[in-house]
Image: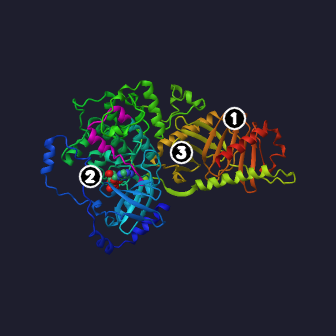
Amino acid sequence: MSSRSQPLQALQALNNGQLNARSNNITPIKSIRRNKENIQPTDKQQQQQQQQQPKKKKEKLSALCKTPPSIVRTRNGRDYRRGNFLGEGGFARCFQMKDSSGQIFAAKTVAKASIKNEKTKTKLLSEIKIHKSLKHPNIVNFIDCFEDDVNVYILLEICPNQSLMELLKTRKRVSEPEVRLFMVQIVGAIKYLHSRRVIHRDLKLGNIFFDPEMNLKIGDFGLASVLPSTDSKKYTICGTPNYIAPEVLGGKNTGHSFEVDIWAIGIMLYALLIGKPPFQAKDVNVIYERIKKTEYTFPDDKPISSSAKQLIKDLLSLNPLNRPNINEILNYEWFKGPFPTRINESSLTESPNEFNLISKTQSAINFKNAKNLAGIYTPKNKNPVEILKTDLNSENKKLLPQSLSPNDTRLKYQEVDPKYIGKKIFSTNFQVKQMNLNILQIYKAIKELENYQDDSSSIMIPHFETPTLISKWVDYSNKYGFSYQLNNNHIGVLFNDENTILKTNDKIIELIFNEDSWTTIENSSTQPPTQIHRQLQIIDFFSKYMNSNLSKIGSEIQENREIIFLRRYTRNSLYIMFEMSNGNFQFNFSDHHKLVLFNSEFGIAISHISPTRKITTIPYQLINNLNYHNIPDYQIKFQNIKNAIKELI
Ligand code: ADP
């Protein structure tokens, strides 16, 4: 994959001799802000004690980082001008960089001298690979990655207003309305991460930055991991003591999963509202003991609302499965309180007091808008099928998988068990680029026919195979996603997070969407990984529903090994259009006539499926000449198809 290209080769080329030579040549940086997330003193005495303690701090790897030259030239000819020092973590120093157009970025700079061993190399590569694959409004945007002789640079979107840690340090405590907005943005980003099976594992106030518009952006993917992974058992305690979840402290035998991020949300929520993390202590071991017993209090002198307490209590549940999952957090009562439209820069230094005056109605609107901006799906005004109205009443409850019932927590995110992790992973077999080329081909055929209206009645009609098409569907996108059955009997769900699960005769195929391609994970259907149980329950639920309530269109085709899934769909009052991963377009019109445009072995073809399920297929060139006139308003229908496809170009 592309993310393995340059840095990997360059890092491997480095030998020990070079490393030693460079490590003697370090530029010291003055007045570095240290990461104090774990040592926010609670009182003066504690501060004094800390000052008295002998400083036998381990040298941080970031100390090996040389100040980059004033101009950094990349291999592909882009020049960046170095600006101010922005901050330092355990591994990297961060500097401003300006490109030739004047745009400013943050360059996370890692000294090659600090990448001594394979483990550190792998860690950095993993950080780059994961971060590069992410795109979300509340995640620091990854721009580029390059290197010079001494450093590797990760170029990121600049977040000039520091992090939540600095905000808390200045403000001491943050108001509930502000924290509500912060939480929506954080939850949006984590929901996105989890939907891509990424666990951040180092969520803390210091890793959540403010962009110029004061939106939060999660950064630092240095500890992030993608499931399935084989290293989950090797995992030793890492992260920042105050934020570590109890199951991580359980040692190497206890696996951990997405719930560690949920725990960290609880810690951040507490810290922002109360002023310090809940398990704060001088001694790290005391912190760990308190975490293991979830021993914390809500101090009387720092009152917070009871609904905030309830949410914190649930997030900080000792048993990971008792924590709300990422989709449930925003349903808590606490989010119904005053909710601001946005946060201004003045909030960095002073407490805004007008937020408590925001009306209930306005707050509800602001909450909804904030969710939309954070990529959290809220139902659109679609025309959902009958199933929606009835799925929660008692008669239908038994149809719902257990984990979907509101009070059940047993089947939420499961621990990672490497045994059941997805079997085969292919990453590049479904590319957006290829699919777009398919659309272009169909579009060209349409255009050509528009330009040359010659007599095509002499064209022979070859024998076409029936195209793969959607024979049944349920639009349940205001809750989970869009489910469909193909005429090859595969069943799929296009979940609202854009990922798909496809069930074939013997496989469960996960298609994880990543901006320009789908990562495909094949699992056997007899031993699917535990972390997709919930999705499988949803797919079974749909499948049962479709089998008992809907009739199929068209005849079945033989089950073949080809994987075809629904890429996207559009609904309006005239038709629903399906765009399939192989480039087929299917239009189901409201009068029950259906048309499928596809790229056949004989060129672009069109199939008509009548309300009585009769299929006729002809070369696309013949649509004007042949007996398609028995389709009501066929010209309007063809025009609709043309317009819809044109819009995709
Ligand atoms: P590490 O992996 O070493 O922990 P971080 O990702 O935490 O590195 O970055 C170190 C510091 O650099 C941060 O604490 C912050 O001060 C600064 N920083 C990181 N990313 C950005 C950014 N996108 N914009 C501005 N400053 C940043």
Picture quadrant of residue 113: bottom left
Q: Residue at x 54, y 53 (%)?
A: 516
**Disc 3 residue lies near ligand 1 with CB under 8 A:** no
Residue 274 shows which numbered tag? Answer: none
Which residue position holds label 3? 498
Cα distance, mark 3 to mark 2? Answer: 40 Å
Q: Residues within 10 Å of mark 3 (few under 14, many from 20)?
A: some
Are discs 1 and 2 less than 8 Å apart at CB? no
Looking at the image, residue 507 sits to the left or right of residue 489; the answer is left
Which residue position holds label 1? 574
Front one among 60 and 497:
60
Q: Earlier in the sequence, mark 1 or mark 2?
A: 2
Are discs 3 and 2 less than 8 Å apart at CB? no
**Could you tell me residue 101's position as x and y percent?**
47, 56
Q: Residues within 10 Å of mark 1 (few under 14, many from 20)?
A: few
The kind of residue on which mark 1 rests is Leu
Q: Residue at x 30, y 51 (%)?
A: 239
Picture quadrant of residue 119: bottom left
Q: Residues within 10 Å of mark 2 (few under 14, many from 20)?
A: few
The kind of residue on which mark 3 rests is Glu
Which type of secondary structure does the marked residue at label 1 adopt? loop
Which residue position holds label 2? 33
Span shown in magenta = 156-180
**Could you tell me residue 376's position as x and y percent?**
47, 39
Residue 176 included in the magenta stretch of the image: yes
Q: Residue at x 78, y 39 (%)?
A: 634
Cα distance, mark 3 to mark 1? Answer: 24 Å
Picture quadrant of residue 437: bottom right
Q: Earlier in the sequence, mark 3 or mark 2?
A: 2
Cα distance, mark 1 to mark 2? Answer: 60 Å
